[in-house]
Image: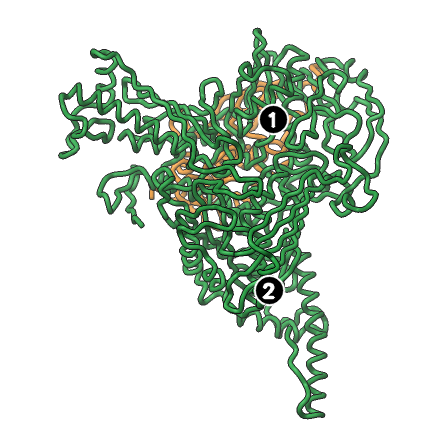
Amino acid sequence: MIKTAVDAGAGSITGRKTGKKTLIGGRIPKLDAPEKVAGLTRYLEDIKLPRMLYGKILFADRPHARIVGIDTAAAKAMHGVRAVLTTADIELVPFGFGGDNTALKTGKVTCIRDEVAAVAADTPEIAAAAILVIKVIYEDLPAVTSPEEALADGAPVIHKKTPDNVPFRFDYLHGDIEQGIRESDVIVEDTYTLQRAAHCCLGRAGIIARFEADGRLTLHSLTQVPFSYKHDLSRIVGVPPEKIRVLQPPIGGAFGSKLDIHPFEPICIFLARATGRPVQIVFTREEEFLATPTRQPMVIHLKSGARKDGTFTFRDVRMTLDNGGRTSWGATTPWISMRTFSSLYRVPHVRQHVDVVYTNNIYACAFRGYGNPQATFALESQIDQLADRLGMDPLEIRLKNAQEPGETTGQGMVLGTCGLAECLKTAARNAGWDVKHSPLRKTLVRDALVRDSNTLVRDSNLAPARVCGMGMASLFHVGGGAKIQRSDGCGTMLKIDDFGGVTVQTGASEIGQGSETVIAQIVAEELGLPVSNIRVLNSDSDFKPWDVGVHASRTTFIAGNSAQRAAREARGKLMEGAGRHLHRNPDELDLADGNVTDRATGEPLESIGKIVRSMHFGGKHEMIMTSHFYEPPSEMPDQDHKGNVSACYAFGTHVAEVEVDLDTGVVRVLGISAAHDVGRVINRMGIEGQIEGGIAQGIGYALYEEVKVQGGRVLNPTFTDYKLVTTREVPELKIEFIETHDPAGPHGAKGVAEAPLVPVAPAIANAIFNATGVRITELPMTPERVLAKLREARKTLVRETLVRETLVRDSNLAPGRGGDIHG
Amino acid sequence: MRQVSDTIDVAFTVNGETVHLSVSPDTSLVDALRDDLELTGTKQGCGEGECGACSVLLNGKVVNSCLVLAVECAGAEVLTIEGLGRMGKLHPLQDAFVQNGAVQCGFCTPGMVMAAYALLQENPSPSEADVRRALEGNLCRCTGYRKIIDAVMAAANGGPRHD
């Protein structure tokens, strides 16, 4: 492992091993940050085009109903209304992962957010008023508001083509579960319930659509996947993909929410077509909560086993996803949960069955982690339950089963580099695990609970008001892209201009995560230029080369590799030109600080700009323009979901320290120690930001966040009632990076973006268990839930104590009898 | 719905310049800033005073500009994110946000900077707890706040931190 020293201010550091100045691993401020802090960045809602209209959508507001009729006369008659659309006015092309969605809905609505009609008007106020006077006559149908109801005999059918309400099933197997059960000395079984959580991007969803005079369609879009977006939209709106231009303005957060085409996007295009004017739709915050999809609610039934020495034997998983009334890409989150169950730690026998079930609830989509936070909550909670049964330290049982580099998992994923054991040890060490994770504490709390259990209220003389505990959890995620389509690649086009400035056109999209800064850094490193000389262009599909999109934590790895290769080729051309201009062998030359230098002495010989000019104007009249399409060396999984889907894999461990208030059930996170195998740090400032932000989202997921849905309706569509973590809840953080230098990554780097959210909730649940002896299996772990479990534990303890006292009394009466009751 | 006949004339100061507007009585300050004055640096995240993205200073105090009516601002002094730096030069607090990595998507940033600016005007040497309290009304979904707190502490202590 290379230890690096920081060179203050410059952002560059000096590698101790090489002695060479490098940008890799430095703290580079984001290139777009100055604009953003100055308030000059133009987000979608800041863009106003001449004669632009404002679009507004009428949502069904009923979970399941037949549309009998729609009367738009009053809306059409309103002053300033330029178009009113219903399904009578547009061609309906099914879209979405399940092919069960359309821009506007005809026949019936299957959730409250179904789009029924839309308006374009001169002002947002007029559009909002017009929506209110559209009359829709519905005939309500019985609503199915949970997967249990949807799976019951005789349940109402939500989509005709799926009479059993189960549009997707997933099955996975490696090994032999029965053998795994036979090999087990302990077996634990439990059910884990995961909630709907909202992305809560601070920038609200929206789009601007405009048609050019020649029929071309220009979109200002927040999509994370501009090229498949063009392809899919083309079919829906009837414009050839080559005539669609996607402009990607800076985006106020995405986290997976912009991976699908959402109905408001084609609706806006239809409004632009109907009016011949640009149309903008921007959601209100309430619409954002109601009509943008959430994280998948899941119920996971997990049974797993271990030998006496802690060796894992098997995992048997049954999962049910509440798909909601329509299907997005989120229905494929079982693919990712599968990787965790099959491959987080070594386990010989794994079986998983998943039912994705239609309900009349709002639907879900991709969200940072993509099914992994749910799976990891179940698995890492259960690993602690196994450790508890075996009387093993949670760290010890995990280390016992942690993979080594070079292993291939049961699902066929090849772990070239693997820092899992190092992550476990590092996170534990930095957290003070040996001292703070005391199994004794749990016993003390239980004793205290017993003492005051008669009243079920704490006696402050006997039990502490607040107790502390520590828990850990790890994660496994793709780190080198995820080949779910035939290509998982990304293109780069690079130009060095005749002043030494570099323009990098990357297929990758910036969504605030800092990818353009990382790409600039990687290019600057190859070309011996300061980062400020690199301009990354990434926001116009007319000039940017193809890319899958920003998802699966893939951008640093895939787009970074692509940019590095394009830059290397440019470097080669530059050195050739320099050799000719300077009458030197190119092998004797190097690049540093914007100059061509003498490799042996480091002496600057000529500026890079001058060399490029000599190539333009000299005998060969050359330009330096290179391109590269990088395709990772991964493979599409086979029909059994097996195969090496990613070019490398990311690991990490979080240790959480919590304080639980025994009177109120309030859980406070005191600290999180995180260690992540990131391959190699590229931008230390950026990667810390990813980890810190992921942890905050993870704490929210664990303790506070839930979109509450009752009878198909959302009860809390505001930030007042949907609680995000604020500055007050962010605990002390200790973050350490484990640099395993993956040979496939750019400078050894792996992807990291989703990882830090994934293990937070189970680490906290395990810490609560360590503090109180109470196991919470449902998220979020609200005070009500914690308190209920504490009360239940007290009642159990009362009963056990009574039994114990009776037995002790009986055994005193009759020597030789009696027994020991285990709690 | 805005009707021309309903508008009220109002004058106030924004970033040191006097502005005269004709606004509807229900126009919020954030809409007046963004729509009438094209000062789009002030962001609207929720429109109900919960996210803090629209934070500006009104007579030196930080407010959610979505909860203030434009007509209430008659004669007042309003400071927005655009008024902090001058002609391509960032205010030291803005620079501290850049240098400390306190910006990701950047949507909450203007409001966050304004809330922090208000704090530092009142209390030039805040404790970390003071900073956390002052910014608790400003939501950020990207950064986890750690680097925002660091940036404000760095600015309070005389400039951006480089490490």
Describe the element under mark 2 as helix, strand or loop: helix
Q: Is residue B53 above or below residue A721?
A: above
Crowding near the residue tagged with mark 1, few <14, some 14–19, many ≥20 C-alpha atoms within 10 Å: many
Residue at mark 2 shares a chain with residue at mark 1: yes
Which three-letter amino acid code belongs to the residue tagged 2?
A: Arg
- Which residue is at a point 69% across and 15% down the rendered structure image? B4
Mark number displayed over residue A182: 2
- The percent position of residue A492, horizontal first and vertical second, equals 40, 25
Q: How is the image coloured?
A: by chain
* Colour that chain B carries in the picture: orange
Q: Nearer the viewer, residue A631 or B148?
A: A631
> Depth-wise, is mark 2 or mark 1 nearer the camera?
2
Residue found at the very far top of the displayed protein: A213
Mark number displayed over residue A206: 1
Picture quadrant of residue B98:
top left
The green-coloured chain is labelled: A
Which three-letter amino acid code belongs to the residue tagged 1?
A: Gly
Q: Is residue B42 above or below residue A349?
A: above
Crowding near the residue tagged with mark 2, few <14, some 14–19, many ≥20 C-alpha atoms within 10 Å: few
Q: Is residue A710 above or below residue A550?
A: below
Q: Nearer the viewer, residue A5 or B30?
A: A5
